[in-house]
Every structure is written in C-alpha cells, then in structure tokens.
Image (spheres, grey):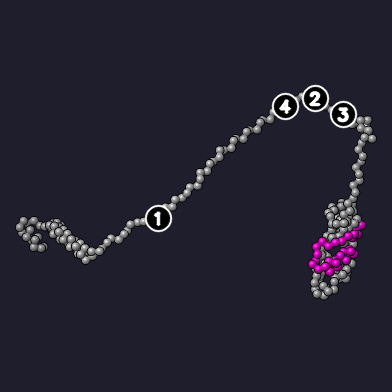
C-alpha cells in the first residue's frame, strides 16, 4: 500500500481499492493531458507554419450524352384472313336415261376418215454415240487375235520407252455383231496410242446385242490398254 492508502486506512478506517484510487487521480491525468496536447499543437504550428492538408477530393469523368435512335413506328397488325366459304352442293336434275349414241359406218363414212399416220423414218444411230436399250451386252469373240493386234499396233517408240496408256473407244455394233463405226471416247494423252487403239478396234468381232430376244444395234464403250511387260 502507498502512503495515501495507509493514511486513509488510519484516518477513517476505510480500505481504498485500486479503482477508487484511479478515480481520485482522474483529474490530475485529465488536466495533464490537456496541457501536453496544447503544448504539442503550439509546437507544431511554431515549427511548421506552412503545413497544409492534402487534397483528397474525388473527381468524376464527365458523362457523354448519347443520342437516342429515332422512334420506330410499329405498323398495325394485318387484317384477319377471311374464312373460306363453305361449299354448297348445287341442286341439279340429271336424267337417268342418258346414253351414248352408237357409232356406225353410216354416220362416219370411210371417205371422211382421216388418213393413216405416215411411217416414222428410222433415225440412223450409227453417226454418233447414243443410247440403245438392250438386255444382253455384246461379247468379244476373237480375244487371241485382239491380243496379237495390240502387240503389232503398239507404236515402237513408245513401247521401247516404256510408255503405255489406256484409250476408251466407242464401238457401234450392228445386228450381226460387226463393228461399223469407232471413235475415241477418252484419249490416252498420246495421239500415237489413240490411232493404234482405233486400228485394234477395227478387227474386234462381237456377238450381237439382244433386247430380250431381238438383235439390236448398239453403241458400247470399251478400254484398249497398251502396256509393257
């Protein structure tokens, strides 16, 4: 205990607590703090007379005005489509005794009849490739002779150089299976091979094409290939 506490105890016989002692010393602490704060403010103003506060104001960007689009005029809704009229069955009197008059030669004499149709001239299909219906395709009969013709007609310069190719050839075959006309459908890229293919095509013999059980002339396309072994 300090002296004050002891004197309080001795004088009055009352024991002072720490809280009581703090309350009694509040006045001294308060006025002492005020004096220190006053002296500190005068010292700051004395030593720092030019002291100014920093600008902490807030700035905002200027808003840009936006032009609104012109007002759109909404057209009125279309008129409602009229409902179709309900069909009505018309009342008609139909005789049940209607008959077709018989046709007789007395009413239609032979002299007044139209002439028979003229015979249609058959088109010559051998001039150019065209489609002809058939059920049985022509087949080559002399394959051995064709193989010999390929070796014989092969251009020597191209054969010795190892140059080959395939020529797609059109064949026009008549009712007896004979080759009547030939022409190049797709070239091999070498005129000498194309000419040789036409020479080989001229010796090929075919069986006739059949449309059901009838022989017919047809155009067919076959490849003729020249190759070195």
Asked if the residue under mark 1 is in contact with the one under mark 4, i.e. CB atoms within 8 Å, the reply is: no
- Would residue 175 be counted in the magenta stretch? no
Asked if the residue under mark 2 is in contact with the one under mark 1, i.e. CB atoms within 8 Å, the reply is: no
Quadrant (top left, top right, bottom left, bottom right) of the N terminus: bottom left
Q: In this orientation, which residue lies closer to the viewer: 200 or 115?
A: 115
Report the span colored magenta: 176-204
Cα distance in 3D space between marks 3 and 4: 28 Å
Residue at 89%, 67% (x, y): give it: 145
Residue at 18%, 61% (x, y): give it: 38
Q: What element carries label 4?
A: loop
| The disc label shown at residue 90, or none | 4
The image quarter containing residue 136 is: bottom right
| The disc label shown at residue 101, or none | 3
Cα distance in 3D space between marks 4 and 1: 83 Å
Rendered location of residue 143, percent (x, y):
87, 65
Whichever of labels 1 and 2 marks the residue nearer the N terminus, that label is 1
Q: Is mark 3 on a helix, strand or loop?
A: loop
Asked if the residue under mark 1 is in contact with the one under mark 3, i.e. CB atoms within 8 Å, the reply is: no
1 vs 2, front mark: 1
Whichever of labels 3 and 4 marks the residue nearer the N terminus, that label is 4
Rendered location of residue 53, percent (x, y):
28, 60
| The disc label shown at residue 198, or none | none
Say how many tags the image has: 4
Whichever of labels 4 and 1 marks the residue nearer the N terminus, that label is 1
């Amino acid at each position: 205990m300090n002296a004050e506490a002891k004197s309080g105890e001795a004088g009055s016989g009352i024991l002072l607590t720490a809280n009581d002692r703090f309350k009694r010393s509040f006045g001294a602490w308060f006025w002492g703090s005020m004096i220190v704060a006053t002296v500190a403010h005068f010292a700051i103003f004395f030593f720092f007379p030019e002291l100014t506060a920093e600008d902490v104001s807030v700035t905002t960007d200027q808003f840009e005005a936006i032009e609104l689009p012109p007002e759109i005029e909404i057209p009125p809704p279309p008129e409602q489509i009229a409902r179709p009229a309900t069909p009505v069955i018309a009342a008609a009197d139909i005789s049940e005794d209607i008959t077709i008059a018989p046709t007789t030669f007395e009413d239609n004499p032979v002299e007044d009849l139209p002439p028979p149709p003229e015979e249609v001239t058959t088109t010559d299909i051998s001039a150019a490739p065209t489609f002809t219906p058939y059920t049985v395709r022509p087949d080559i009969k002399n394959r051995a002779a064709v193989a010999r013709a390929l070796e014989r007609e092969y251009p020597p310069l191209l054969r010795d150089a190892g140059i080959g190719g395939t020529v797609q050839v059109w064949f026009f075959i008549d009712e007896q299976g004979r080759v009547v006309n030939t022409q190049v459908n797709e070239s091999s890229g070498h005129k000498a091979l194309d000419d040789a293919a036409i020479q080989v095509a001229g010796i090929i013999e075919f069986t006739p094409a059949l449309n059901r059980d009838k022989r017919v002339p047809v155009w067919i396309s076959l490849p003729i290939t020249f190759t070195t072994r």
